[in-house]
Amino acid sequence: MTAAHTRRTGCRLCSSERLTEVLKLTPTPPANAFVKAEALARPQQAFPLDLFLCSDCGHLQLLDVVDPAVLFEDYVYVSGTSPVFVKHFQDYAEDVLRRFAVPPRSLVVDIGSNDGTLLRFFQKAGMRALGIDPAKDIAAQANAAGVETLPVFFNERLGNELRVQRGPAHVVTANNVFAHADDLKGMLAGARALLAQDGVFVFEVSYLVDVVEKTLFDTIYHEHLAYHAVKPLVPFFKACGLELIGARRVQSHGGSLRGVAQLAGGPGRADASVAELVALEEKLGLQGAEAFGAFGRKIDALKAELHELLAGLKAKGKRIAGFGAPAKATTLMYHFGLGPDLIDFIVDDSPLKQGLYSPGLHIPVVPSRAVAERKPDYLLILAWNFAEPIMAKNKAFSDQGGRFIVPVPAIEVR
């Protein structure tokens, strides 16, 4: 272990130390640790990616914790570069406002607000919006664009301070960050302190059912410390003074869970969705180690199939480029052994990643015009959750004989 890396000994949800290792992936550097050309000679440390299942509450998690300052303060992911995600957050905001009859001018706080994409839709609906995000450059961009954003980590102390300074929040959201915090109890304590008596805490996370059923193993990386299922969350929220009253499946990131919680004893009634998803998880055996042994075997089979395909194409002299440089690509490329010998370059639409090199493997990341300029034969869609819009946007590539390879959830050549 190093100053940037620690290993916890207890479950994040229930503190039990009865933890069993159920899946071991190839160690990687932090998934978003892209590097500049002048830093290529410096080695990048790889950290373990080992999943542990709690024998008491059934929560699946990483125990190896990389310093969040290393992971998030110089972040390179922004939501607003993806039209799919912009639309997702527009629908999300409209759904929350409609379902919970949020009063005009209510305070909405987004934990891990990124570039403010979600909050802008709450602003347009007349709400007071406040973002919390430790990525300093991205927070500065959000502030410049008119979404007030504090460049700090969220915790109980901040939740209490904000309530005093700004009054209670009717909506607190945490999207794709409720799996990122090592101290989930602290995050919930802060949300509880900030919430109005009739307020709601709405969170969205990758859903363990989808991860296992669709072999979405590449969503496992160091930012994602928790792999959430509904069953372990019910008692966890209760222990934190909150009540999980809704849990629905949504399509983002290949399959996510959107949960809704209120203060214990709040006015909302739990709907049938919570019990329905708990029953599904029990049917799939997700609180037992056997399910993850089968999951590991599926990953191994996918690895062998993809590696054989790409190595065969390279042996025929074909040029292969990656499309998209999401965090999940780091896990996929490391665990499947996809280095610069197989992938010539990676295309990404985000200016924050262009001109950099991929974490550890140091494959160059370039703008999308490189597809027409360099004319690869195949595009391996690393951002597979956006495969359809990527293929539609790059129809000129396929019209000229180029082929797409989708690696997850099942390998497709199109």
Image (spheres, rainbow, N blue to C red):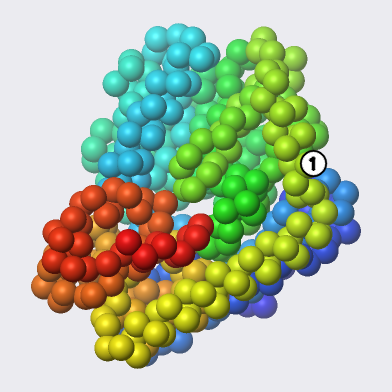
User: In screen coordinates, is 93 left or right of 305?
Assistant: left
Residue 290, position in %: x, y?
81, 60
Vertical position of residue 115 compared to residue 23: above or below: above
Residue 138, position in %: x, y?
33, 50
Is residue 405 something that shows in the picture? yes
Query: What's the amino acid at mark 1?
Result: Glu
Residue at left 42%, top 40%? 113
User: In screen coordinates, is 383 left or right of 5?
Assistant: left
11, 368: nearer the viewer: 368
Q: Which residue is mark 1?
A: 282
23, 280: nearer the viewer: 280
Residue 44, position in %: x, y?
47, 81
Residue at left 70%, top 20%? 272
Residue at left 45%, top 24%? 108
Q: Quadrant of the N terminus?
A: bottom right
| Residue furthest left as drawn | 373
Vertical position of residue 325 compared to residue 138: above or below: below
Vertical position of residue 374 compared to residue 368: above or below: below
Q: Looking at the rendering, which quadrant does residue 148 occupy? A: top left
Q: Quadrant of the C terminus?
A: bottom left
Residue 233, position in %: x, y?
73, 38
Q: Residues within 10 Å of mark 1 (few under 14, many from 20)?
A: few
Is residue 150 something that shows in the picture? no
> Callout 1: helix, strand or loop?
helix
332, 320: nearer the viewer: 320
User: In screen coordinates, is 60 left or right of 248?
Assistant: right
Residue at left 39%, top 13%? 105
